[in-house]
Image (tube, rainbow, N blue to C red):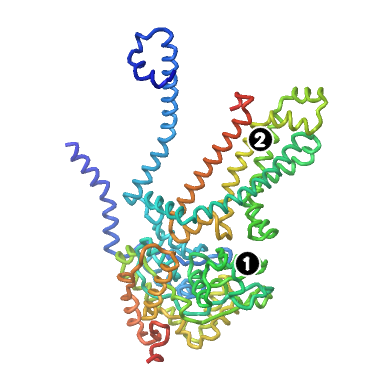
Amino acid sequence: MQRRTFTTLLGAAALPTFSIVRAQSLTDKPSVIRIGFPNAGTGGRPVPTGNFPASADQLGEIAQEFKADGIRLEWKYYAGAGPALNEAYANGLLDFAFGHGDLPLIVGRATGLKHKIILSSGRFGPTYFVVPSGSNAKTVADLKGKKIATFKGTAGQTQMIRFLRRAGLEEKDFRVISLNSDDTKAALATGDIDGTAGVVTPFDLEARGIARTLVSTDDPAITTPGTVWVGETFEQSYPQIVQRLVTRLVKVAEWGTHAENRDKQFNLWARSGTDPYSNYKTDWGKVTDLRTRINPLLDDYYHAALQRAIGEIKEFKLIRKDVSLDGWIESKYLDTALKELKLENHWPQFDAKGVPKSKAA
Amino acid sequence: MSLTADVPEGLPRDRSAPAQRSDRQAALWGFAAAGARLLLIVAAGLVLPALLFTLWWTATERHWVPEQILPAPALVWQSLAELWHSGELQSHLEISAARVSWSLLIGGSAGLLLGLAMGLSKTAKAYLYPTFDVVSQFPVLGWIPLLIIFVGIDEPLKVSAISLAVVVPVAVNTLHGIANVPRSLFEVARVHRFSLPQVIWRVVLPAAGPSLFTALRQGVMQAWLTLVFVELLASSEGIGYLMVWGRQLMQMDLVVVGMVVIGIVGVLIELVLGTLEARLQRWRPAAY
């Protein structure tokens, strides 16, 4: 008798919960979508920068997409970059990441975070090794044993390690401290560090006489494409919502590849304060076809670069467990979006080495 | 006559034992009781850690908290062992210990001098105390931006920030210790025409001893607290750095290892200070 009462009570308590779940699956839409960027503007201002997902946020495209459905959008900007974004996701505070770098992405996966890679947020671009303007160094090797900075735990660190390796050096040859990009600039100005790589675009600092570029490179083997992912639970519960979001993002990416929008998007990105317009202008100066860098594809290059990064990160002992690409990359949303928008042939495919396929053939 | 030989046969014949034996027996019982009491105290002290450990273990075992946030005890133990064997832990600890030692030396002596000056001279107190009182209200965190401008982000930043954190508790406790020295002792010193060094050495230091040790203890505690915070900034080594690094790579076990090490070092320092104090204060058993 008593047991029955208890069961009834339990059932009564559970009923509202079940009905909420049912209501959700019937309409197939969440009440809120939580999107995280692994960067914030200068001084933590909530303005993302540097890629087409950032443009999509600033142009209000995603908000517009879901306005009619009454779905609330929650934007989060992590000054602690990729590692902070990982923590937030592990705590169940996020559904999407807009532009995760290789190191935090792979570190998160290695610790068991469950997400699906749905498109890339961009690729390539130069890497600079920057020193204070008063530095006597002529090569990176001159700085052996000195103090250099990068943002540890982010893609900036892997970029720096690869850069050093190309010069026949490794992290251990230096005292490497962790600083974010604002602090790195300040430390260059005060001479507190002897160099930096992977974090700072130097042109405004050069113009102000604070720093100079020691070496720079466009080598595609130094960088890894950025990644947009969705949490596995969200993807399973609301595939249509994921599709709409991906399609909208691809549309913004396409907008960004047109020459007439080049300056417009640099101006949008400059709002974050991390880099002024002139930095983007020079940084992208050699990019004649914007489609090479503003590229959402999960092509051979994306796969190869991610696989390469996993190997390197394991070798650098930054992860303990192996990470497999199997079941991690879900390209169906991107494929559908490209088809829907008739953009199947808009972006050039790159081979595993980062060479455009049409050119390579 | 050996005590151990008596125990096995002595105990069962307790009641029928002659009078001269019962004395020793009573002493033995007292001994046993004291031992049991000590055991109880230790056991009582272990209850809470044991409960916490069980909670930790269960929480990870049953996945109440994601593994990325709270690592399993086994993993923490494994990382601790690995770091120890590779010598990495010792080198981090060495660097942190050096930072703490320098800061204790600089901040501790500055605090002691300040406290002595303000405690012994009314004039010094009139000039120094108001400023000291205001400045001591700033948390170390508030000093950091200013310190970065003056001393940069390197070793001097760490040592000066920790020293600042040490100065205040040492000075305050020294001051209070001197203020609590009975006036009559100073009067006796005056009668004997003691010089200032004599007053400090023979009156102030012995009488204010316990307070000085409290000052030292609080200084050490503050130093370790601040160390971890300061090592979060622009470091490439040290226990605090190890913890930040672990967090950046989502290896929370490293963070917990850092916490455990800091805890153990704290207990060790406390033990050393306690022993030292007990030795120095032996002439005055009531003090400890």
Q: Chain of mark 1?
A: A
Coordinates of residue A15 in the picture (x, y in percent): 25, 50
Kind of residue at badge 1: Ile
Coordinates of residue B115 in the picture (x, y in percent): 72, 38
Query: Measured along the vertical axis of the image, is residue B243 above or below residue B49?
Result: below
Query: Measured along the vertical axis of the image, is residue A124 above or below residue B99?
Result: below
Helix, strand or loop for disc 2: helix
Name the residue at 66% across, 60% down: B152
The residue identified by callout 1 is A193
Question: Tags 1 and 2 in contact by the CB under 8 Å rule?
Answer: no
Name the residue at 38% across, 19% down: B7
The residue identified by callout 2 is B212
Whole-angstrom CA distance, mark 1 to mark 2, is: 40 Å
Name the residue at 45% across, 23% down: B34
Q: Chain of mark 2?
A: B
Kind of residue at badge 2: Leu
